[in-house]
Image: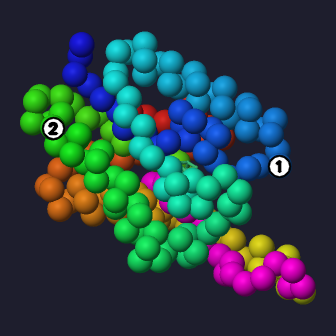
Amino acid sequence: MNKKIIIMSHCILNNNSKVRYINDEKRLEQNKEKQKFIKKIIDKDIGIIQLPCPEFTCYGSNRWGHVKDQFDTPHFRKHCRDLFKLCLEQIEEYINNGYEIKAIIGIEGSPTCGVTKTCRGNWKGELCGNKALSSTINSIKECKEQGIFIEEINKMLKEKNISIKIVGLDESNVEKILI
Ligand code: SF4
């Protein structure tokens, strides 16, 4: 046992939690790359802790894709904090017993788990009868900031004076990740 642990976003290990996607082939391809990445971690005998998926646990399997602005509510932030609480206790216990938490891995571009990139946009209101629907959808833009869950994780780690590297996994370029 080498006493090393990596904590990762839920959907790296369980693709089923993600917003349903039209291009299933692309997703299957990305999933294969993620599986290779996970295998490398297992081969190095590094333990894996899977974070809960805040979007799935809050909105379920039939949710639409959202932007960060829609998730930026007191309730969703509290939900994220509640979900991370149990993981934080485990982190403390491992650190107190000489284990190394090598990294927390989020998902680039996610409104929830993004680490250096998330998405914002003027998304709100009814879909039916919205004559400006395409311009609403097209208001989405990539932003160089964290998703809501990663922001709350950062705050909770700071509150405990715990420093852990947080890195983002780019699902279209899994190889690029450095941990
Ligand atoms: S990126 Fe985060 S919120 Fe989105 S599906 Fe993955 S674990 Fe869930």
Q: Is residue 118 above or below residue 32?
A: below
Residue named by callout 2: 93
Residue 9 location in percent, x, y?
47, 43
Q: Which quarter shows the N terminus?
A: top left
Q: Amino acid at mark 2?
A: Glu
84 magenta-colored: no
Q: Main secondary structure of the magenta part?
A: loop
Residue pictured at 41% horizontal, 64% vertical: 79
124 magenta-colored: yes
In the displayed structure, does residue 97 sit left or right of residue 117?
left
Q: Give the mark count.
A: 2
Q: Amino acid at mark 1?
A: Ile
Q: Report if the beta carbon of the residue with label 2 is closer than 8 angstroms to ligand 1.
A: no
Residue named by callout 1: 22
Q: Which quarter shows the C terminus?
A: top left
Residue pictured at 35% horizontal, 15% vertical: 45
- Identify which residue, 145 or 47, lies in the foreground: 47
What colour scheme was applied to this rendering of the protein? rainbow
User: Which structural element holds mark 2?
Assistant: helix
- Identify which residue, 61 or 121, lies in the foreground: 61
Residue pictured at 58% horizontal, 75% vertical: 70
- Identify which residue, 129 or 131, lies in the foreground: 129
